[in-house]
Amino acid sequence: MLELTEKRLASLLWMLKNKGKKWSILELNKGSAGLSYRPMFSFVKELEEKGFVRKDSKTAEYGVTRVVDLVRFVSLAKPVGSLKTLNFHSPLEFPKTLKMIQESKLPHAFTVFAGSELYRPYVKTDQVHFYFKKGEEEKWSKYLLSKNCLKAQKSQANLFLIPTEQEAIFKDAAKVKGYFVAPTSILLSDLLSFGGLAEEQANFLMEEWLNNRL
């Protein structure tokens, strides 16, 4: 299986954002701000060997050929359930918790059901997952405590904060009904790895995304 480092993930997010386009390794290198040129070249060649990308013999440009498989690869390599989280319990109902997070004015991007429900209501849940910038743990803790949220064990929590250094998660976040949602490739990956109803929701949204309806 391919190794997926944070810098490689940054490159994959750029490729999936540009899933319908052809690109050069230099363009990928500049656009993703991930790997330097030589490691990027090696990574693209690995992806080519696995059939995830294909080189155009005429233009020498690359393009993603197995979009769904690439998203599934990310979900297997970085399942959302294995990611480190800060855990809190919010006394508010699901929609009000989303609004409270939005009003923090701190960088964030909703994922799992907190993201997918904004696209299509599908489940009834009080669980809210979102990414925040690594290093801002203290800011979030102070804000949430001021809103009567309590720190909690994972089993008692309904608010899960995921620290990340991936700038693309915030830079390329979608604005859905006024809320910031993680880039579609990350949202789908997280839903797939979460399993159950989240995986069902992922399969529906995947079709919408592939047909450019999201």
Image (tube, rainbow, N blue to C red):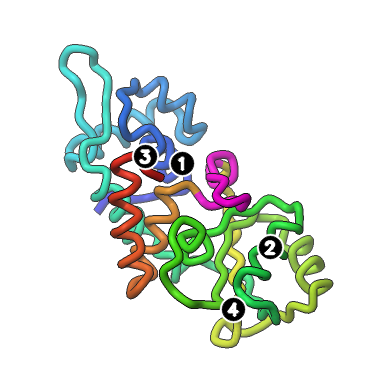
Q: Is residue 63 above or below residue 190?
A: above
- Residue 145 x/y as whole percent: 80, 74
The image quadrant that residue 95 belongs to is bottom right
- Residue found 48% across the figure and 77% down from its top: 124
In the picture, measured across the screen, residue 100 lies left or right of residue 183, that is: right
Which callout, 3 or 1, points at the residue further toward the start of the chain?
1
**Is residue 174 found inside the magenta-colored segment of the image?**
yes
Mark 2 and mark 1: Cα distance apart in space: 28 Å
SS type, badge 3:
helix
**Mark 4 = which residue?**
158
Q: Give the label, 2 or 1, closer to the camera.
A: 2
Tell me where the magenta segment starts and ends, as one range. 168-182
SS type, badge 2:
helix
Which callout, 4 or 1, points at the residue further toward the start of the chain?
1
Q: Is residue 23 above or below residue 20?
A: above
Q: Give the label, 3 or 1, closer to the camera.
A: 3
**Mark 3 = which residue?**
16
User: Given the image, on which type of amino acid does mark 1 rest?
Assistant: Ala
Mark 4 and mark 1: Cα distance apart in space: 28 Å
Query: In the picture, which quadrant includes the C terminus?
Result: top left
**Mark 1 = which residue?**
10
Q: Nearer the viewer, residue 100 or 161?
A: 100
Query: Dot 1, crowdedness within 10 Å: few (<14), some or many (≥20)?
Result: many
Which residue extends farthest top?
A: 58
The answer to whether the residue labelled 2 contacts the one labelled 1, judged by CB atoms less than 8 Å apart, is no
Q: Give the label, 4 or 1, closer to the camera.
A: 4
User: Given the image, on which type of amino acid does mark 3 rest?
Assistant: Leu
User: Given the image, on which type of amino acid does mark 4 rest?
Assistant: Asn
The answer to whether the residue labelled 4 contacts the one labelled 1, judged by CB atoms less than 8 Å apart, is no
Query: Dot 2, crowdedness within 10 Å: few (<14), some or many (≥20)?
Result: few
